[in-house]
Amino acid sequence: MKKTFKIEGMHCNSCAMLIEKELKEDVNHVSASYAKEQAEIDFDENKISERDIKDRIEALGYEIVENEKKR
């Protein structure tokens, strides 16, 4: 399953690399972008759940944005 996660709290490209490093062993592909404030992740739901991915990103100190916030 390929999914794009909107992520808040990244301050630089090192933040994106940290997310990639955290997940790369357990997913098929991960590409995080500081500039786009998102991570595109291709994963096998039989190996890691979407909830586990979100929990691991949040444990690094970032926030997953579920819906666009209205201003």
Image (cartoon, rainbow, N blue to C red):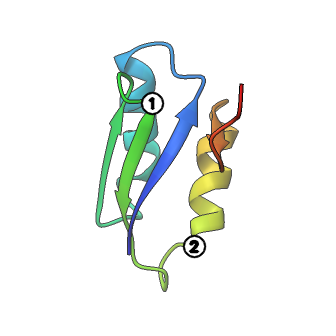
Figure quadrant of the N terminus: bottom left
Residue type indicated by callout 2: Ser
Q: Is residue 47 left or right of residue 49?
A: left
Residue marked by disc 2: 49
Above or below for 26 versus 65: below
Seen in the picture, residue 17 relative to 23 is either above or below; the reply is above
Image quarter for residue 39? top left
Q: Residue 1 or 25: which is nearer the viewer?
A: 1
Q: Residues within 10 Å of mark 2 (few under 14, many from 20)?
A: few
Q: Quadrant of the C terminus?
A: top right
Q: Nearer the viewer, mark 1 or mark 2?
A: 1
Give me the residue at 41% from left, 64% from top: 26
Residue that extends furthest to the front in the rendered view of this protein:
71
Asked whether disc 1 touches disc 2, contact meaning CB atoms under 8 Å apart, the reply is: no
- Between residue 3 and residue 49, name the one nearer to us: 3
Residue 37: give its label. 1
Q: Secondary structure at mark 1?
A: loop
Quadrant of res 57 = top right
> How would you rate the neighbour count of disc 1 (Cα within 10 Å): few for under 14, some for 14-19, many for 20 or more?
some
Q: In the image, is 10 to the left or to the right of 29?
A: right
**Residue lying farthest top?**
11
Disc with the residue nearer the chain's start (1 vs 2):
1
Tell me the residue at 69%/40% (across/down). Answer: 59
SS at badge 2: loop
**Residue 69 lies in quadrant:** top right
Q: Disc number at residue 20?
A: none
Q: Nearer the viewer, residue 68 or 39?
A: 68
Q: CA distance from mark 1 to mark 2?
A: 21 Å
Residue depicted at 36% across the width and 38% down the height: 32
In the rendered structure, which amino acid carries the disc numbered 1? Glu
Q: Position of residue 17 (x, y in %)?
A: 36, 30
